[in-house]
Image: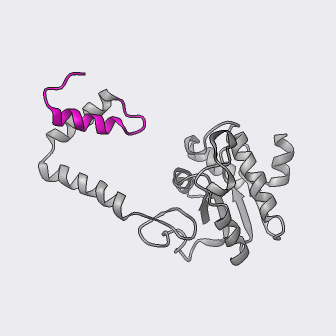
Amino acid sequence: MQFSSALLENAVNEFARLPGIGKKTALRLVLHLLKQETADVQHFGEIISKMRSEIKFCHRCANVADGDICSICANSMRKQEVICVVENIRDVIAIESTQQFNGTYHVLGGVISPLDGIGPDQLKIESLINRVQKDQVQEIIFALSPTIQGDTTIFYIQKKIQPHTIRITTISRGIAFGGELEYADEMTLARSLQNRLPVESYVANSH
């Protein structure tokens, strides 16, 4: 791809670094910005810069937040005693889109995957255990993608919190094994949450 402007080429290369964005799509986006008013493009850049520099992660659940605590954890109308454990922030957004869950979340930041060099210590598992110990948690819902890595993570955390007398469930198999939670349609995801199973039943059906 030949460019008559080094500035244009640099902009295209930066956009192309984004996941799922190829050089052609990057060029289309940059040319679109070139057609916009200078003030609009500056505002766009400022929003992105401010997001990166000022966004925080909730001290309680590790979800994105504008302050120390996210809006979900701070909402007194949410069921603080129910925690939905997810792999990443995209999963929080996916579940919130169903409008079927009124509890809180805990973002692990990934799943246990020894082949990828990801162990329990690299995930926010200890902070989840602390929440179970300190807060009056009544139920933990595992909403991890139904993969071997997801199952391994569920089994590991389950053993960690077994001494505590709380309900431990997982989303039902409405999500196909091997599928990613964030790509499930809202109705399937909502049904999987509503029809959640005790982890013991999940283990029996999985193996």
Q: Residue at x 14, y 53 (%)?
A: 39
Q: Position of residue 6 (x, y in %)?
A: 16, 33
Q: Residue at x 24, y 52 (%)?
A: 44
Q: Which residues are magenta?
A: 1-22
Q: In which image quadrant can residue 81 be found?
A: bottom right
Could you say which is closer to the camera, residue 6 or residue 31?
A: 6
- Image-based side of 96 in relation to 135, left or right: left
Q: Is residue 132 above or below residue 47?
A: below
User: Residue 21 magenta-drawn?
Assistant: yes
Could you say which is closer to the camera, residue 45 or residue 170?
A: 45
Task: Check the picture and name the quadrant holding the C terminus.
Answer: top right
Q: Is residue 102 visible in the rendered structure shown here?
A: no
Q: Is residue 39 above or below residue 3?
A: below
Task: Check the picture and name the quadrant holding the N terminus.
Answer: top left
Q: Position of residue 77 (x, y in %)?
A: 56, 74
Q: Residue at x 56, y 77 (%)?
A: 76
* Residue that sits furthest to the top in the current view: 1
Colour option used: one colour
Q: Position of residue 140 (x, y in %)?
A: 72, 63
